Amino acid sequence: MTNGKRQNKLLVYSGAAAIAAVAFNVAIFFINAHRRRKERKELPGSNVRVNLSAKEINALADEIIAESKKIHDLVASVPPEKVTYANAILPLAELEAKQFPLIQSCIFPKMISISDDVRGASVEAEKKIDSHFLMCRKREDVYRVVKAFVDKGEWLNLETKCFIECLIRDFQRNGVFLNLSQKKTLENLKSQIDSQSLQYIKNLNEDCTFLLFNESELSGMPLEFIKSLEKTEKGKLKVSLRSNHVSPILEYCKVGDTRKLVSLKHGQRCGNDNLLILENLVQLRHQYAQLLGYASYADYAIEPRMAKSSAKVLEFLDELSHNLIDLAKGEFEILKALKQKEEGDSPFGIEDTLYYMKRAEEQYLDADFDVINQMFPVNLVVNGIFRTLQDLFGLKFDEIDDVEVWHDSVRIFSVSDFSCNELLGYFYFDMFPREGKYTHTCVLALQNGCSFSNAIRQVPIALLLSQLPKQIHDNSGLLKFSEVVSLFHEFGHVIHQLCNRVSFSRLSGLRIESDFFEIPGLMLENWCYESSSLRLLSGFNQENAKPITSEMCRVLKKRRDSFSGLKLKQEIFLSVIDQMIHSSENVDIVDLVKHLHPKVMLGIPILEGTNPASCYPRLAVGHEASCYAYLWSEVFSADIFSSKFQGDLMNQYAGLQFRNKVFAPGGGKDPLEILTEYLGREPSIHAYIKMKTTNSLGYNQSLLK
Ligand SMILES: *[C@@H]1O[C@H](CO)[C@@H](O)[C@H](O)[C@H]1NC(C)=O
Ligand SMILES: *[C@@H]1O[C@H](CO)[C@@H](O)[C@H](O)[C@H]1NC(C)=O
Ligand SMILES: *[C@@H]1O[C@H](CO)[C@@H](O)[C@H](O)[C@H]1NC(C)=O
Ligand SMILES: *[C@@H]1O[C@H](CO)[C@@H](O)[C@H](O)[C@H]1NC(C)=O
Ligand SMILES: [Zn+2]
């Protein structure tokens, strides 16, 4: 605050300079621009191998494993009294740095190759490589050497310390210090956990319960939906419990009894079977964590994350829940009033929430999505994202058009520093869907930024896979608004990967733990909701001159945040259950759910007989003890946005600081310290609460009249 003036001057200067420079680059992105067909070269500084054949992938995987085994054996052979950084740590660090791009070269073809053979070879290679490296992390002989080095207590810089801590932690989390019988127990627990997790998912996937309704019981449903339903001989309509049936019914069906029955059956799926499995899983995980020396599974899962302990997570969820009470209450009043208007005095149940949220949005936040979804031609959006990122973070993107790629439609860009022209890295942009390609949008690290002992720096390389619509005739393909947001988000991961300056591949941008990892992407999503920045990405398809209006922006933002009090409380409810069941050995899950729901959800009881524990896969598989992570990232991303960028979206000073203080240190520094240093104080939940409150419908009681 105190030196705000100085910062602003700097900003005016660098902002204008950057915009001028960016103007030269605006034309870089044209989807069907003619591209010279030259002999394709290798990308300078890249160790990634693209377009490998199945045979080559196989051979490379074997080479990787052989080389890794050689280096691990070499380190293991160092006598404890002779360990030095150069013979114990450096070989492992350099092995990882060199092998990462090669490993990715084997693994990423499974997501992009048009050939079945290549994808198959890639999947096999990944299995082989994974199991090799898991074995390495269990090697006691290597662990002893690394530990001997740590015990010497040499002075190390922060990053090196961090790297060695990661190494040690990996070994320890894999049970390297256990005796033989304990190791067997650990492995046994692991395989039981894996098979029970699979069973939980399998039960859900195989559930084919359906309900029968007649048309009047489905009143309110769009005709298309009704037509899509299978009919029984007696003319009843068959509704499954899959989300493509359940969600629309809960949002549109006017008949309260139908909504309630669908809600009930949906929340009862796999009832006792999966509940038993989850109880069993919780116990197995608890034993697993205790064997490794942790008080609980939650502590084991959260140790490497920004939150660090389960207690901290619970405190966060509790504080958030508490601060959302007023907002949620206001929203609940609106829903109750709407229900009373439409259905009279029947009591409001949890199964009514989606339906009346939808009605309220239709009534108060009418946005013409047919028009809005015409406003984002791919060319404009991508150009706009490029311009925004370049200007904000002081970067320069240049297309390179004569290097080797795996498909002719794949583009590649170099990213350099705007003021000193230093090459920071590259990203591949594989834009369009095609057969065999991964069907979601995502970012992969292909090569990690790091420095070798000979002072040579390896530049980071990212790959962005997306599913942009292709140009048809003269019309550029159009993106839906939600796709614009998700593309912007993914670019946050790209920039994160490219702007880190760490020395160790292990600490590179995308290796960061999951509750911190989403912060840049979630922060950048905010640029899609402010008219000054959204304007850069939009134009009406037929008449390019017509960008999005500020009124449209206002409605989009309100829709994003509508009923967030209640929606977030629902999320908090599930996250608290997740923490609590993974914090001790034996929790009565049914009792916990029954008790906790009204406590978090403003007194509304859970629908009698339902239990998320039996049909909410995130509790059971893959996100156990970390359901809170996304919310955590979202809350702190709002803090950064509101204190550094809101009202000054092109604040290049804040952008450069973000690059230097948040992106640059990667995983080489404690994430809480990173954020605290950037913000000049500890991160807080209040900006997030304020953002949700300001944009909420619930805030404005005059709506009820
Ligand atoms: C392994 O360690 C546990 C716990 O310290 C001990 O109870 C057990 O006897 C040990 N087993 C063997 C075979 O050494
Ligand atoms: C639909 O089912 C309900 C409940 O079973 C019944 O009361 C109603 O008469 C049925 N309507 C028609 C048109 O068959
Ligand atoms: C990839 O390799 C295949 C077979 O080796 C070759 O036919 C194809 O042209 C290559 N694709 C590109 C884009 O270089
Ligand atoms: C509440 O809504 C009314 C009507 O839509 C509007 O005129 C008023 O400014 C709003 N008040 C607040 C505090 O947002
Ligand atoms: Zn993300």
Image (tube, rainbow, N blue to C red):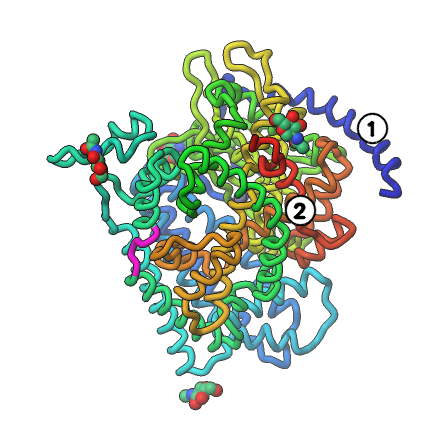
Residue drawn at (53%, 50%) of the image: 569
Residue 492 in picture, x, y percent from top left: 59, 40
Name the element at disc 2. helix
Where's the C terminus, which quadrant? Answer: top right
Q: Which mark is residue 663?
A: 2
Where's the N terminus, which quadrant? Answer: top right
Q: Count residues near mark 1 (Cα–Cα under 10 Å), then give few for <14, some for 14-19, many for 20+.
A: few
| Amino acid type, mark 2 | Phe
Q: Which mark is residue 185?
A: none
Against 527, residue 685 (above or below) is below
In the displayed structure, does residue 17 sit left or right of residue 535?
A: right
| Amino acid type, mark 1 | Tyr
Residue 225 in picture, x, y percent from top left: 29, 30
Q: Is residue 368 magenta?
A: no
Name the element at disc 1. helix
- Of 214 and 569, nearer the camera is 214
Q: Which residue is mark 1?
A: 13
- Of 585 and 175, nearer the camera is 585
Q: Write down the quadrant of residue 287 in the picture.
A: bottom left
Pointers 2 and 1 in contact (C-beta within 8 Å): no
Against 535, residue 252 (above or below) is below
**Residue 317 appearing in the image:** yes
